Amino acid sequence: MARIVKRAYTYRFYPTSGQADELVRTFGCVRLVYNKALEERTRAYAEGRRVSYGESSAMLTGWKCSDALGFLSAVSSVPLQQALRHLQAAFANFFAKRAKYPVFKSRKKARAPAEYTRSAFRWREGRLTLAKMDAPLAIVWSRPLPEGAEPSTVTVSRDAAGRWFVSILVENEIIPLPPVAASVGVDVGIAALVTLSTGEKIANPGHGRRERRRLAGAQRALARKAKGSANRGKARLRVARVYARIADRRRDYLHKVTTRLVRENQAVAVEDLAVRNLVKNGKLANAISDASWRELRSMLEYKAQGYGRTLVVVDRWFPSSKLCSACGTRQEAMPLSVRAWECACGVVHDRDVNAAKNVLAAGLAES
């Protein structure tokens, strides 16, 4: 049965110099309002009281009327109010013990965003014009929006590589895929990104490893530049572009792999790996991060949910590599150096394929 969900479509765009200046001012004001509101809330929290969104909004009005912060009135008020709403949500998550205490936004580290609701932009015939701008954004429509879609929220951002993006939130009808009989177990790895219970191994392109020389050269050039100089800013941009290239290629590859798995299988079983703990291994940290296991699982989760598939997560302590998938005998030890082994029942196992088969069996038993 079809479902109506909200989905964000992200596109690159190329602002004019005037639009870029306006957006940079908006980003700075959003960051300032967020940090000042957080400062006031932190002060109140230390005194044992809480500040509501309404009180923060009243503070914003006072800041706009002051001489020191009167420039806040020069940008659209909607992104500033949205920053306060995001801060309110952050504190709600903190008080509910779902997240840590909110932190200040850094000009150097934070991705610059500005969120516009329906009252702060104009959408006509596929052309998007933001508040305080007299011309629509030059968006590269890499894929069409759903037919008849009307944006409810628009988020504009600029990444560390200097690229501009606009994320358009619309309501979209998702039709579940036709049911299939196949199910698959997935074992993630480094040499092979994914090993399936069918015996197939999907290679790990190692995008970070392939760009290592280019990245190292860009980082050495950055280290030689004087801090605060214009050349250092250019060198930093070159490093950021290499990182962006790696991330884009990795994300594109993961999308293709996860979409295929969800389309071809009714149920997908994966292990619940503690990636945060695994990257503490200094010898494997770079390889694990380059494989991006957490992002792969995240993609499987939302794609399975959206298209009517089942994703089963097997307990991380399940001994998938030590069990014989044929007879169920458990081996005493199985170091990482052992890539193939023979069970007492006479079956010779590929370590990863055997683990994927056990993950599938455990997942089907749980579901």
Image (cartoon, rainbow, N blue to C red):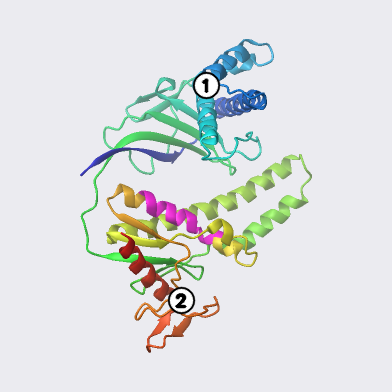
| Vertical order, 272 against 230 (above or below) | below
Return the x and y of residue 308 as percentages of the image width and height: 27, 51
Amino acid type, mark 2? Lys
- The region drawn magenta spans 289-302
At horizontal 46% and vertical 26% (from top left) the residue drawn is 116
* Number of numbered labels in the structure image: 2
Quarter holding the N terminus is top left
Q: Which numbered dot is residue 53?
A: 1
Q: CA distance from mark 2 to mark 1?
A: 54 Å
Q: Residue 143: in sight, yes or no?
A: yes
Asked if residue 291 is among those painted magenta in the image, a careful observer would answer: yes
At horizontal 35% and vertical 81% (from top left) the residue drawn is 327
Magenta stretch: helix, strand or loop mostly: helix
Q: Nearest the camera: 159 or 359?
A: 359
Asked if residue 292 is among those painted magenta in the image, a careful observer would answer: yes
Return the x and y of residue 50 as percentages of the image width and height: 58, 23
At horizontal 38% and vertical 54% (from top left) the residue drawn is 300
Quadrant in the rendering for residue 356: bottom left
Quarter holding the C terminus is bottom left
Q: Secondary structure at mark 2?
A: loop
Q: Which residue is mark 2?
A: 322
Q: Residues within 10 Å of mark 1 (few under 14, many from 20)?
A: some
